[in-house]
Amino acid sequence: MHSIAVYLVQLAYGGPEEGGWFYQTGELCTDPELTAFGTTFADGHEARVKAMSDEVQAHLDRDWNTGDHAREISSVLSAGRFEARVHDGWPPLAFPAERPRYE
């Protein structure tokens, strides 16, 4: 099974190593207007999953990624961006599951 879910994606501060580093984090959106985009597909429908994900992302870019959400997440003025993500199985509540470590 594949699922599509909408996340608010932002950059989080990872640590001071090498002058500071950041990593992407995402939180599952619970706004009813955004959870309505969530859907699942049976295995074997990868082309439909990709097409639906692209449609959802186009809608998000048009109607939700505006104002401070329109900025790239690397900008200090960014409030994050809404992204449609595809997952194998049920979508996680957030990503990454564990905070990355600098090595």
Image: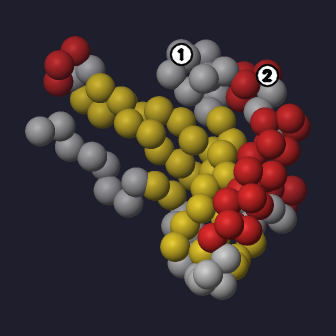
x%, y% of residue 42? 66, 84
**Dot 2 corresponds to which residue?**
67
Where's the C terminus, which quadrant? top left
The amino acid beneath tag 1 is Val
Label 2, secondary structure: give it. helix
Looking at the image, is mark 2 or mark 1 earlier in the sequence?
A: 2
List the residue tagged with mark 1: 76
Image x and y of residue 62, in percent = 86, 35
Give left or right: position of 72 versus 51: left
Structure colour scheme: secondary structure
Q: CA distance from mark 2 to mark 1?
A: 14 Å
In the rendered view, tell whether residue 25 sits above or below residue 79. Answer: below
Q: Residue at x 26, y 20 (%)?
A: 20
| Residue 97 locus on image (x, y percent) | 38, 60
For mark 1, give the secondary structure. Answer: loop
* Residue at screen point 18% across, 37% down: 102
Q: How many marks?
A: 2
- What residue is at 42 percent from the left and 34 percent from the top? 12
- Residue for point 30% across, 33% down: 14
Q: Quadrant of residue 67?
A: top right
Q: Quadrant of residue 28?
A: bottom right
- Determine whether, in the image, residue 63 is placed left or right of residue 53: right
Within 10 Å of disc 2 (Cα), the crowding (few <14, some 14-19, many 20+) is few
Query: Residue 43, relative to residue 96: is it above or below?
Result: below
Pick the quarter of the image with the N terminus.
bottom right
Most extreme residue toward the left is 103
Number of other residues with Cα within 10 Å of mark 1, as a class: few under 14, some 14 to 19, many 20 or more: few
- Work out whether residue 29 can be spotted: no
Task: Name the image quarter holding residue 91.
Answer: bottom right
One can see residue 33 in this view:
yes
Q: Position of residue 18 (x, y in %)?
A: 17, 19
Give residue 9's mark: none
